Image: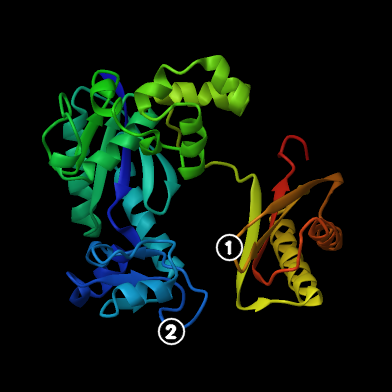
Amino acid sequence: MSWWVLHVDMDQFIAAVEIRRRPELRGLPVVVGGSGDPTQPRQVVATASYEAREYGVHSGMPVRAAYKKCPEAVFLPSDPAAYDAASAEVMDTLRSFPVVVEVWGWDECFVGAETDDPEALAAELRAAVVERTTLTCSVGIGDNKTRAKLATNFAKQPRSHAGPFEGAGTAPGIYRLTADNWRSVMDHRPVRDLWGIGSRMERNLNELGVVTVADLATADLDVLKKRFGPKMGAWYAALGRGLGDTQVTDIPREPVSRSREETFPEDLVERPDVERELRRIAVHVTEDVVAEGRTIQRVWVKVRFISFYTPIKSRKLPTPTRDPEIIATTALSLLEKFDLHRPVRLLGVRVEFVPPTAS
C-alpha cells in the first residue's frame, strides 16, 4: 500500500455548528461574528453561511458592512466553546480510523494513511463525519501536504471550475492532486492560487515576470533567492512545482508565541490613552504566558491606525524574562518607533517564548 496525505476541511464550519443547534436556520443567510449585533461598531465577521456569501459577505469584513450587503441575514455572536467541542467531535471521528490525524485548527487537519484506494478512504471519512456529527467536510488527496491542501479547494468547487480531473476520482467533495496531474491542473493558474502566496507576494512575483504557477516552477532560482532570500526563494521555487512535506504527525505542535490584540470601540487619539491601553494588553498577555510556565525572549507591538495602516515593530530582550513590568516597558519603548499623529484603531502585543530546550 502507498502512503497518502489527505486534507480534511470542514464546510462553513462555524456557521454549520450554529445551524446544527438551530435547524430552523438551514437555508438562510447566517453571519457569525462579534456580539451578533450588527449595529455595534468594530466587529468582524468570523464566518458566513454559503447563502450569505452569495450576497458578498465573507469572513474578515466588518459586521456592519455585512449588514449593508445582507440586512435580512441572521446575525449571531461567536461561541468559541461550542466550536471547540464540535471540532473535538470531528477529530475524534477521524481518529477512529487507522490513520494519523494532524490537527491544524477548528475546521481542518491533515490525515496520513497507507491505502491502495485514497478516494474510498476519503469517502469513508466524509460519511463517518456526517453520521456522527451531522457536519460535512471536503477532502483533498495528495502525495504531500501542499497538493492535498490545494486539492481541497477543488473538492469544494463545481467540477466545471476545477479544471482537468484526470485521475482525480469522481466522488463529490473529493479531489486528488499529485505529481501526475499537477501541471495539467495548476500550470495555467495564477500564483495567487498557491497555498501560502497572498496578494502582496503575488505582486512581488509579478514584478519578476512570474505570473502563473508554470512561471514560478521554471523561474531562475538565483533570481528568487536574491529577491526573497536563500530560504524563501528556494521555498517559492519548490511551491511552484507542488513539492511539500509528506510527514503527518499526531504530536501537538508546540506554541512558540502568544498574542493579544484589541480593536477599540472608539479610536484612541491622545498618546496617554494609547500608552495606558498598550501597557494593559502587555501585562495581560505576559500574565497568561507566565501562568503556563513559559519565558519570553522577544516582544512585538502592532498598531492599526484609522486608515487601516498596520505597522509592526519588535525587539529581542537582553535577557529572557517572566516579568510583566519588563514586557510592558519594552512595549512602550517600541511605541516610540511609531508615528502617533493619527487616531489608533487597534493595539496588539505578541511575545515569543524561549524554546523549551533553551529554558
Amino acid at circle 2 = Thr
User: Which residue reaches farthest right?
Assistant: 318
Front residue (pair 8, 213): 213
Q: Is residue 235 left or right of residue 358?
A: left
Q: Residue at x 44, y 45 (%)?
A: 104
Q: Amino acid at mark 1?
A: Phe
Residue 1 seen anywhere in this rendered image of the structure: yes
Relative to 297, is 122 on the left or the right?
left
Q: Quadrant of the N terminus?
A: top left
Precedes in sequence: disc 2 or disc 1: 2
Q: Which residue is mark 2?
A: 39
**Crowd class of label 1 (few under 14; some 14 to 19; many from 20; radius 10 Å):** few
Q: Nearer the viewer, mark 2 or mark 1?
A: 1
Quadrant in which the C terminus is drawn: top right
Q: Residue at x 20, y 54 (%)?
A: 130
Q: What residue lies at 38% left-to-right and 43% top-to-bottom?
A: 109
Picture quadrant of residue 216: top left
User: In terms of secondary structure, where does tag 1 sit?
Assistant: loop
**Badge 2: residue crowd in 10 Å (few <14, some 14–19, many ≥20):** few
Q: Position of residue 62 (x, y in %)?
A: 45, 70
Q: In the rendered view, would you say 137 is above or below 303? A: above
* Res. 49 image quadrant: bottom left
Expressed as whole percent of the image width and height from the top left, the position of residue 175 reads 21, 35
